[in-house]
Amino acid sequence: GENVEQHPSTLSVQEGDSAVIKCTYSDSASNYFPWYKQELGKGPQLIIDIRSNVGEKKDQRIAVTLNKTAKHFSLHITETQPEDSAVYFCAARRGNFNKFYFGSGTKLNVKP
Amino acid sequence: SAVISQKPSRDICQRGTSLTIQCQVDSQVTMMFWYRQQPGQSLTLIATANQGSEATYESGFVIDKFPISRPNLTFSTLTVSNMSPEDSSIYLCSVGALGRADNEQFFGPGTRLTVL
C-alpha cells in the first residue's frame, strides 16, 4: 500500500517568515494530495489540495507544489502569522473513492 | 463544503462500558469515514461506511469492537464497545464531498473520549 512520510515533525518560524513542509509518497498511482490544518481541539480542515495533472497551486499565502517524478509534494506558507500555528497533515490517495493515507503531521509554531 | 457535526463533543467513560458517537451532515453524501486520532498522532482510518451496505473495516479494527450504522445519506454512528483506557482518543467522522467522483474529504470536529 501507500506510504506517506512527512517532514519536519516540528517547525518554528518567526512571524513574517516562510514555512515549508514536505511529504513523500511511495505509490506512483496516487493522484490526489490534500493538506489539512488542525488547530488545538478541532477537526482537520482542508486548506489546499493538488491533483496529479497540476504541478503547482496557490491560494493567497499558501501554495502546494507536486513533483510526480520524485514523488514528493510540499506546502509553502508565506508571510506566516501567529494564527498559522497548528498541526499540518499531508495525505495521498490513489484513484477516486479510495482511502487516504496521511502523513505523521507537522507542528508549526509561528512566534510573534 | 459539507457541515459536519458530532455528538458528544467529549466524554469520560468507565472501562467496560460502550459509547455511541453520532455524525450528522447537512447534505447527502455517498461516503462517510470514521477515523481515530490518538494523542499527538496522525489519523488512522477505522472503517468506511456507505449507505445500504456493511461498513468496510481496516486492518486491526473489527465490527464487534467498533460497530457502525449508516441508516441514510446524512447520518452515521460509531460505537466503541467494551472500552479500555487504550481506546482514549479523538474519534473523527469524515465525509466525501457530495458524491463527486474526485471528492475531497471533510472532517467533523471530533469526539474526545477518555476512558478511565
Image (tube, coloured by chain):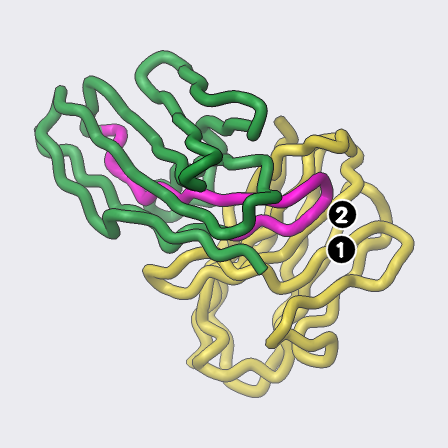
Chain colours: A green, B yellow
Q: Chain of mark 2?
A: B
In x, y percent, where is residue A55?
46, 22
The residue where tag 1 is placed is B49
Percent position of residue B109, x then y: 51, 45
- Residue receiving disc 2: B75
Residue A18: x and y, percent?
A: 18, 25
Say which element carries label 1: strand
Residue at the spot x=16%, y=33% of the render? A110
- Amino acid type of disc 1? Ala
**In the picture provided, is B17 more to the left or to the right than A111?**
right
Is A59 within the magenta?
no
Mark positioned earlier in the residue sequence (1 or 2): 1
Would residue A87 be counted in the magenta stretch?
yes
Labels 1 and 2 within one chain: yes
Side of A11 relative to A55 (left or right):
left
Q: Is residue A52 above or below residue B107?
A: above
What whole-number distance in Å separates the C-alpha atoms at marks 1 and 2? Answer: 10 Å
Q: Establish if A12 lies above or below A54.
A: below
State whether residue B57 is above or below residue B96.
below
Q: Quadrant of residue A83?
A: top left
Nearest the eye: A87 or B81: A87
Chain identifier of the residue bearing label 1 in the image: B
In what quadrant of the picture does the N terminus of chain A appear?
bottom right
Query: Magenta part of the protein: which range?
Result: A83-101
